[in-house]
Image (spheres, coloured by chain):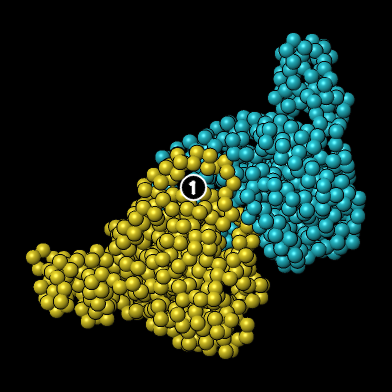
Chain colours: A yellow, B cyan
Amino acid sequence: MPSQPLYLQLAGHYRQAMEAGTLRPGDRMPALRVLSERHGVSLSTALQTCRHLESLGWLEARPRSGYFVQSSVRPRLEPVPEPRAVLPNPAQYVGIHERVSSVVVRGRLAPVRFNLGGAAASAPLYPCEALRAASVRALRREPALWGQSVPHTGHPAFCAAVAKHLLSSGIVTAPREVIVTHGGTEALALALRAVGRPGDVVAIESPAYYGLLQLLESLGLRALEIPTSGHTGLSLEALDLAAASYEGIRAVVFVPHLQNPLGATMPAERRRQLVQWCEAHDIVLIEDDTFGPLYDADTPLPAAKSFDTTGNVIHCASLHKVLAPGMRLGWVLPGRWRSRIEMLKFTQSRGNEVLSQLAAADFIGSGSFERHLQRLRARLRRHRDWMAAAIAAGFPQGTRLSQPRGGVHLWLELPPGTPSESVFDAALHEGIRVAPGLMFSNSRRFDHCLRINCGLPPTPELGQALRRLGRIVAEAR
Amino acid sequence: MPSQPLYLQLAGHYRQAMEAGTLRPGDRMPALRVLSERHGVSLSTALQTCRHLESLGWLEARPRSGYFVQSSVRPRLEPVPEPRAVLPNPAQYVGIHERVSSVVVRGRLAPVRFNLGGAAASAPLYPCEALRAASVRALRREPALWGQSVPHTGHPAFCAAVAKHLLSSGIVTAPREVIVTHGGTEALALALRAVGRPGDVVAIESPAYYGLLQLLESLGLRALEIPTSGHTGLSLEALDLAAASYEGIRAVVFVPHLQNPLGATMPAERRRQLVQWCEAHDIVLIEDDTFGPLYDADTPLPAAKSFDTTGNVIHCASLHKVLAPGMRLGWVLPGRWRSRIEMLKFTQSRGNEVLSQLAAADFIGSGSFERHLQRLRARLRRHRDWMAAAIAAGFPQGTRLSQPRGGVHLWLELPPGTPSESVFDAALHEGIRVAPGLMFSNSRRFDHCLRINCGLPPTPELGQALRRLGRIVAEAR
């Protein structure tokens, strides 16, 4: 890692203290003079440190009193517990599609006033106006744009912007190595089609995003659900145990930042171990970094791909969660499967349209992207904290709540025995859509869980809806 | 068919006469007065008839002399002969990808001055400016467009425009039945994934578009190549023979208009027979109507889908050849595989971006679409005739040429024994890219053929390039 400015180092130090509970919500931060003397930095660096932590939502400034650790709801609800390292069962996902689809269809058909079932921030949090202007500029610069065939693996300007963006994750790649895809979904589909054949076993996190479960089923792949921590992600110990018990795991799919639905972020050192472990076992590692730039820090942690020296890691990511839900822009760094992934992309859908690539490249290249991400993280943090507080206030005793360091979703374990499908149906009846736990696993171990979108801005109506949801949970037991 | 205006009926009558050779190039059309008396129509209807045939490129007006049948190059080169109804061999396309890819890669790496290897008209033939303006309008009407998630199966405005557009092919469908895809390629990929499993046999035309061969191989499907006429398309007799000999054909893929590469258009009555035959044999019919609106008539022939009463026909089409190569807009009418195709689209790539859908819907709804198509057909006809004449003038004796009634490609059978791969390499060396016949079949029966893009405007340089190509062919024997 390059050496950080002093104020960021100091902010990291105090942030760890807050995360560890050494500094607790409501505590007063040391005065600027104290900080300056204690750490041998200038007063202006001490001030910069506090302002930075304030911008991230960790501190609040009170007039004439100094900085205080922001109140948090964390003491109120217990965190989601660690999983047991049980031996998983390879499941052929027969039936997962029907179960998930039945939930999705019911959700679509019902009139919904509060959609907490998705995993995106609301439109005003994205730079719509800047992207609109960039689109108009691109149409002016290239008036014959719609009349020309599209480049197969992506527009060079966008590939260059992606390559530059990936530097913040420690990935050094040539623009020509980037294959642009129709969103992160297609990136993942191409990666899985490239390495797996029907019947192959793929190890995944448990719980996992239901889109991945559907994708595996549609490709005839079998999923092996590996226990996953809400804090550190995929359990490497459980993965090792699984590999010793089952021959022929073909690939591992994992989400490095803010795993969907748990919110876990795997520490950098474990990522390095995972890369090495996969290589030693001749198992492909597919990294799905959909949420990296939403991680509450100035830079994401180094990607698994950054530790890859042999091309065994396929890195997938996209812009829909972090820049523009309406742009279906994803990409894949194909490692040593380049020619196969390129062929599959060509036969499956050809290249992406050029306009959104040009507009996104324009925005990413302008420096506005970094400022947008800082603002987005800060606003999401406020939304998330507010929603966690509302849940803590309105849900029954025994509810447990994830503590993600960023992102757009919260994971709830309801009191044991609460059926999430009944909660889903009853909430839908009141115009509130949630994502029930049964969508995220074939094991039915999460049937008492809920994923809730926390990317929506706080409003009194949303507060009421969450209280109503809490009552539905209490009544469903 | 709805009853046509008088002048169109009359134009159809004379067109048939010209196609049958009753009226030959250079012949004088009967005078307007004669037409009026002979057919009992007004003078103005007779004039309208001649002007219409002129706009389609069949007649030319000579000052003070009346209308004459336009010169045609057809007498010069023999047409491509009919195929023999041999029994096909189901081939597992192992290797087709490598062969095709090797050609594609060589073509991409070499500097190309004349790209005759594609199958699209040049950018100036598409309404770039109108689509640009429609895009800017859409961005103004929906400023938060890039910030909002996309609808899964297509934007309602675009689905409605597609449903309206399909009326001209005799297809009556509700907008909600249309599933928008990333181009015709994804439409076809979804159709094949929905109905076939690895190892299944799919009957296809021979020769067929190489993208289809690659797609089948990538899905693990086996292709059964059915002899196909350059005039009437897929041979139903050969298909029947194949079905009697091979158990378990799962689907038939066919191109109703201007088949790629032969240029064949299947007559309406044979389409009806094909639909009924597939139904009787419990074989899915996949119709790929990429080129329909380029067929040289005011309306395309009725689609196979228009004869479908049970949902056994999956209809795929797209706008890239007919409206905008840079918009990756296709669609599928899924028949009775709706839920499976919808699920596959969701797991494979999610919904399409909205902007191009809105701009295309705006254009299609404006009435400009019909005018654009008329102009495009007339210009393509001139380009095609010019190129056919240039080929006839410059290629060796024994070359045979397809006679498509529209579209953007010509199919050449070179004198027996001419290796198209050598021609491809030698032409590429001179900066001319063509599509060699070996790309279009696994049977190697077309290794002496070439597909040439005739969507480019005539220029002296292109004329020279075609003469150069003719010499390369002559030298390659």
| Chain ID at mark 1 | A
The residue sitting at 45% across, 67% down in the picture is: A172
The residue sitting at 42% across, 61% down in the picture is: A164
User: Where residue B18 sits in the image (x, y, percent)?
Assistant: 83, 26
> Crowding near pointer 1: few (<14 within 10 Å), some, many (20+)?
many
Q: Nearer the viewer, residue B39 or B428?
A: B428
Q: Is residue B216 visible?
A: no
Q: Is residue A47 above or below residue B326?
A: below
Q: Which residue is mark 1?
A: A355
User: Where residue B202 sits in the image (x, y, percent)?
Assistant: 77, 59
The quadrant the N terminus of chain B occupies is top right
Q: Is residue A430 above or below residue B461?
A: below
Secondary structure type for disc 1: helix
Answer with the quarter of the image where residue A63 lies: bottom left
- Which amino acid type corresponds to the residue marked 1 in the rendered image? Leu
B6 left or right of A71 in image: right
Answer with the quarter of the image where residue A79 lies: bottom left
Q: Nearer the viewer, residue A97 or A169?
A: A169
